[in-house]
């Protein structure tokens, strides 16, 4: 675990919550992959569209980290969700939104041992 991976994902959430798409883009790789159960897309244009279509406020809950993968539990308007991030050199290279934390952990093979205190 590195602090920079967590810091990158927290800054990414701050930008998403502030609808600051320029900062969101600067924290993301050029070929970022974004997705959810409805599909995936790649690139900054796809990120802008994805960010605009999702709830504007995602309060960060529990965080799990292992080998560049960060799973974040999110408290959103209609309940909870989770997002799985891949962070490389302080840039988000992929983010996939899951319906719940257990689905995100299963998809990434992270466990309770990866929970950040």
Image (cartoon, helix red, strand yellow):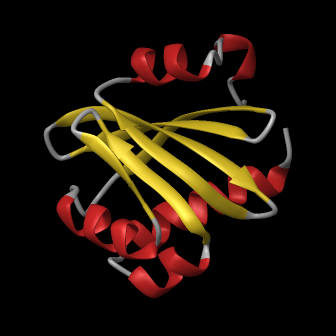
Total tally of numbered discs in the picture: 0
Q: Position of residue 16 (x, y in %)?
A: 39, 68
- Identity of the residue drawn at 22% across and 56% down: 54
41 up-or-down from 114: above or below: below
Q: Residue furthest right?
A: 2
Q: Residue furthest bottom?
A: 22
Q: Quadrant of residue 83?
A: top left
Q: Is residue 87 left or right of residue 62?
A: right
Q: Quadrant of residue 111?
A: top right
Q: Is residue 25 left or right of residue 39?
A: right
Q: Position of residue 94 (x, y in %)?
A: 55, 50
User: Depth check: 94 or 13 in front?
Assistant: 94
> Which quadrant is the C terminus positioned in?
top right
> Which quadrant is the N terminus positioned in?
top right
Q: Position of residue 20 (x, y in %)?
A: 40, 82
- Identity of the residue drawn at 70% across and 52% down: 87
User: Depth check: 75 or 105 in front?
Assistant: 105
User: Depth check: 43 or 81 in front?
Assistant: 43
- Identity of the residue drawn at 49% across and 48% down: 95
User: Depth check: 48 or 114 in front?
Assistant: 48
103 up-or-down from 83: above or below: above
Q: Is residue 97 left or right of residue 7?
A: left
73 up-or-down from 7: above or below: above
């Amino acid at each position: 675990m590195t602090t920079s991976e967590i810091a990158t994902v927290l800054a990414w959430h701050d930008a998403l919550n502030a609808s600051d798409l320029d900062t969101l883009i600067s924290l993301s790789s050029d070929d970022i992959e974004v997705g959810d159960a409805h599909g995936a897309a790649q690139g900054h244009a796809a990120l802008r569209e994805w960010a605009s279509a999702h709830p504007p406020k995602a309060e960060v809950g529990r965080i799990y980290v292992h080998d560049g993968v960060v799973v974040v539990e999110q408290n959103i308007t209609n309940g909870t969700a989770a997002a799985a991030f891949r962070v490389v050199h302080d840039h988000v290279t992929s983010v996939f939104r899951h319906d719940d934390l257990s689905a995100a952990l299963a998809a990434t093979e992270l466990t309770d041992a990866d929970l950040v205190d």
